[in-house]
Amino acid sequence: MYVKDLSKCKEFIAGDDCLIRELLNPRLNKELALGYSLAHAIVKPGDTTRLHRMASSEVYYILEGKGIMNIDNEQKLVSPGQTIYIPPKSIQSITNSGQVDLVFLAIVDPAWREEDEDILL
């Protein structure tokens, strides 16, 4: 059985300026038979992630806060309990439009690798 505690995951700032903790990534643990990665992400109030595009598909699941999701030329308000699908190579960012942290899970398939993320601004 594999169990990982969020508080024991190393925090880092991703290329899009989002605060990330990787929960699952097969490159971090070769014993995991996964093709995807799972990360916990935070965007502070008033902040927007940098425009970027991923080689992989991505899914966000909003846990806390509210925001504005930008994918290509489309914008949608997002809030807890919502899931957002981001197709591969889509230009994307998310803005925290609330007063508290915007917290979400990010699933990347195939698994996230820094070299698969293209920062545009």
Image (spheres, rainbow, N blue to C red):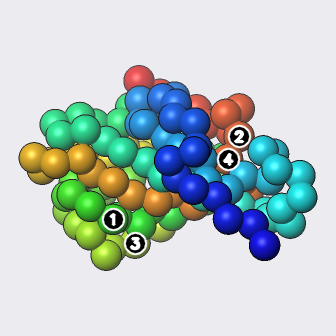
Nearest to N terminus: mark 3 or mark 4: 3
Residue at left offset 26%, top offset 61%: 64
What secondary structure is found at the residue carrying circle 2? loop
Measured Cα–Cα span from mark 3 to mark 1: 10 Å
- On screen, residue 82 above or below 39: below
Q: Which amino acid type is marked by label 2?
A: Arg
Q: Which amino acid type is marked by label 4?
A: Trp
Q: Which amino acid type is marked by label 3?
A: Thr
Measured Cα–Cα span from mark 3 to mark 4: 18 Å
Q: Quadrant of the C terminus?
A: top left
Q: Residue furthest top?
A: 121
Q: Residue 112 carries which label?
A: 4
Q: Which residue lies furthest to the right in this view?
A: 31
Measured Cα–Cα span from mark 4 to mark 2: 4 Å
State whether residue 66 appears in this view.
yes
Instruction: Identify residue for label 3.
Output: 83
Residue at left offset 71%, top offset 61%: 36
Are the residues at dot 3 and dot 2 in contact (C-beta closer than 8 Å)? no
What secondary structure is found at the residue carrying circle 3? strand
Q: How crowded is mark 4: few (under 14 residues within 10 Å), some or many (20 or more)?
A: many
Closer to the observer: label 2 or label 1?
A: 1
What secondary structure is found at the residue carrying circle 1? strand
